[in-house]
Amino acid sequence: MGTAALEVADIFRTHGPTWRQAQRSHLSLGQLKVMTAIEQCRSAALGGHVLRCEDCQRLQIAYNSCRNRHCPKCQASAAQRWLDARQADLLPVDYFHVVFTLPAPISEIAYWNKAVVYGLLFEVAAQTLRTIAADPRHLSAQIGSTLVLHTWGSALTHHPHVHGIVPGGGLSLDGQRWVACRPGFFLPVRVLSRLFRRLFLEALEQEHRAGTLQFFSQHTALADPKAFARWLAPLRRCEWVVYAKKPFAGPQAVLAYLSRYTHRVAISNSRLVAHDERGVTFRWKDYRDKGRGQGKTRHKTMTLAPEEFMRRFLLHVLPSGFHRIRHYGLLANTHRRDCIEQARQLLMPEAPSSRAEKAGGGTAEQIRPTFVCVHCGAMMLIVETFVRGQPIRIPHQRGPP
């Protein structure tokens, strides 16, 4: 029998108790909750149930998951539910991938002001897209966007940015026609970058004047308005990274792409390579390495001390209740259904009954058993449940008839 795959939970279970005690005064309640959730996920500590296969009668014990949004093991089912709900939102147009990234100096103060700075990142990125798209010199249309927050780089460093998935066009300003982008081109990224920089810095200044920003360690002097203004000055001149990727190969490719981004955590278990006396080794991608033509590769491995690995992982714990997936413009939750229906009618007019038949045609195909036997593929049924701390009592296993 092969060895079990290495998991982030293994590292937290091994080193977490000691490190938690040593860092007690430096860890937030949210970080402590994430550590506990990951350590207990899919273990007897959370209870579970006993399954029996309807065909081969084999028994299987399944422990409950923690369902914490930072846990690497708990995102697949949540992502699938989210993607199933988004199927109805797809339009028969090109989709573009747009990324807005904060400069390193702002990332440093963002760690202590996550709710404020991450919230600004969302709102300003969405406002930038809507403003440039509505400009008659560009698209002159009302657009929609789905933005997903990621706070990490490949090496687990703090690197806040939002990924945007945007339909290649929008409703005309009077709502009477669909305005499509030029083939293969969304909006000029240099124009997006300049407006994003200006709007974000203006919003950040307003937050500073309102007293909502906190500063610690080497940044304590920034609480003074004059010092903060001097600190902002270079950020008004440097380049802010905004880029747009080529359109996807059809709406279904958009869903496949979204499935890799919407419910991703700082590092997946599949990227872990080893956990030994040297530390924790994992795969990462070095985006600064441009020498691939000389035989180099951007895919590398990095080894960190377990304490440093846990510290970096916990950098990315979001504030309680903070939404990391948000919809704007035509895709905003308040009027998404009406806007999508209007756009669909303008793009491919057809009878409402025909659309209803198509929408209902795939319902039966999506119904699938919750638990499937790994041996024969048949449906498994829950025959017993046990709560936290309750000893597991395996039911008598019936023999074949």
Image (tube, helix red, strand yellow):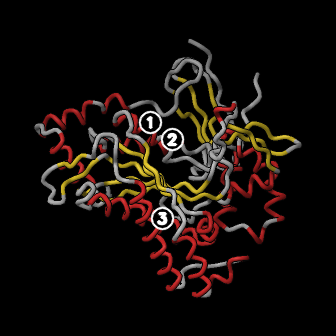
- x 67%, y 35%: residue: 297
Q: Nearer the viewer, mark 3 or mark 2?
A: 3
- Quadrant for residue 52, please give it: top right
Q: Is residue 89 left or right of residue 287?
A: left
Q: Inspect this view and state whether residue 349 appears.
A: yes
Quarter of the image where one finds residue 184: top left
Specify few, some or many for label 1: CA neighbours under 10 Å numbering under 14, 14-19, or 20 or more.
few
Dots 2, 1 in contact, CB < 8 A: yes
Q: Nearer the viewer, residue 97 or 277?
A: 97
**Picture residue at 73% right of the left edge, 41% below the top:** 282
* Quadrant housing residue 35: bottom right
**Most extreme residue toward the left, as rendered?**
351
Give the number of the disc on residue 260: 2
Q: Position of residue 302 (x, y in %)?
A: 76, 43
Tag nearer the camera, 1 or 3? 3
Which residue, given by chain and number where applicable, does mark 3 sit on?
121
Kind of residue indicated by mark 3: Leu
Q: Amino acid at mark 1?
A: Ala
Q: Residue at x 38, y 40 (%)?
A: 247
On the rendered image, what quadrant is the N terminus found in? top right
- At mark 1, the secondary structure is helix
- Pick the residue in front: 327 or 400: 327
- Residue 181 sits above or below residue 231 on the image: above
Pointer 1 or 3: first along the chain: 3
* Disc nearer the start of the sequence (3/2): 3
State how far apart marks 2 and 1 are (Cα). Answer: 7 Å
Label 2 environment density (alpha carbons within 10 Å; few <14, some 14–19, many ≥20): few
Query: Residue sitting at 43 percent across and 54 percent down?
Result: 147
The span from disc 1 to disc 3 (Cα, nearest Å) is: 25 Å
